[in-house]
């Protein structure tokens, strides 16, 4: 859940359908719809949240170790049709254009620790975990070649050096990014920058209460996670220090 400004955070819309959501990974439809130029996920603890909440059995590609495989359609037939189902399955195996049916293993329950453990056991010793892969796909989607983001802040998300190495590779080939974690990434701007001030989340609160202006419009191309407005101090993780 994100907000285009502090004012919007303090006065959220009454209709939940008007809320601003930025999904991760950022899909093409949402990217084209929002056309974001400023995006901040400061203090969202993305890595920890993914490790606790994201499950590999929720996604087709990562759940493959739980599939029974080809021919499993034989398990789902009407009584008396077993032989016909076997013959039909044999024909389907020879037909590359025929649809392939997959079913879950009957001895596992989706969403259970046993299902996630089986998927983890199927990984190679040097293969990254599902949470690592998910996080990296999210980073790739934020700095996609068609992304319009100019300022991106990912401090306080538990990023590691490996995460940031991927991030910096994406930055080097990105066309529109100007600042990462409030640090200039363009050589000409960095060369002429007399000082670098990184102050908290980068979203200062109003110095004194101001009267609400109903005609004031929030920026249409900015999104800040709610955590940005809930913290004054930003934690610097391993990856954040490496970016710096």
Image: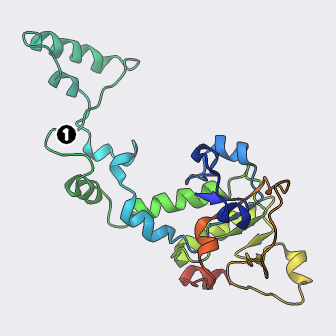
- Residue under the image location 39 percent in, 66 percent down: 51
Question: Label 1 belongs to which residue?
Answer: 105
Q: Quadrant of the N terminus?
A: bottom right
On screen, 9 above or below 208?
above
In-front residue for pair 188/178:
178
Q: Is residue 218 visible?
A: yes
Q: Residues within 10 Å of mark 1 (few under 14, many from 20)?
A: some
Q: Position of residue 194 (x, y in %)?
A: 90, 89
State the residue at coordinates (89%, 83%): 191
Screen quadrant of the C terminus: bottom right
Residue 186, placed above or below residue 80:
below
Q: How many marks?
A: 1
- On the image, the x and y values in percent for residue 233 come to 61, 85
Q: Nearer the viewer, residue 88 or 149?
A: 149
Splitting the image into 4 quarters, where does residue 78 fall?
top left
- The image quarter containing residue 48 is bottom left
Secondary structure type for disc 1: loop
């Amino acid at each position: 859940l994100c907000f285009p400004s502090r004012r919007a955070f303090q006065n959220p819309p009454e209709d939940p359908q008007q809320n601003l959501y930025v999904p991760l990974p950022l899909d093409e439809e949402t990217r084209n719809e929002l056309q974001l130029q400023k995006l901040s996920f400061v203090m969202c603890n993305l890595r920890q949240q993914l490790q606790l909440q994201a499950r590999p059995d929720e996604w087709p590609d990562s759940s493959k170790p739980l599939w029974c495989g080809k021919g499993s359609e034989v398990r789902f037939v009407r009584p008396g049709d077993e032989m016909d189902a076997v013959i039909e399955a044999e024909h389907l195996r020879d037909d590359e254009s025929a649809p392939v049916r997959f079913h879950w293993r009957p001895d596992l329950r989706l969403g259970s620790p046993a299902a996630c453990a089986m998927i983890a056991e199927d990984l190679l010793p040097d293969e990254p975990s599902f949470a690592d892969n998910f996080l990296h796909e999210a980073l790739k989607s934020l700095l996609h070649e068609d992304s319009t983001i100019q300022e991106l802040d990912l401090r306080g998300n538990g990023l590691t050096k490996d995460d940031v190495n991927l991030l910096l590779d994406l930055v080097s080939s990105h066309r529109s990014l100007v600042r990462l974690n409030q640090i200039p990434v363009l050589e000409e701007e960095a060369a002429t920058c007399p000082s670098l001030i990184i102050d908290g989340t980068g979203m200062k609160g109003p110095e004194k209460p101001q009267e609400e202006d109903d005609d004031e419009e929030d920026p249409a191309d900015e999104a800040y996670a709610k955590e940005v407005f809930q913290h004054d101090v930003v934690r610097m993780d391993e990856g954040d220090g490496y970016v710096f």
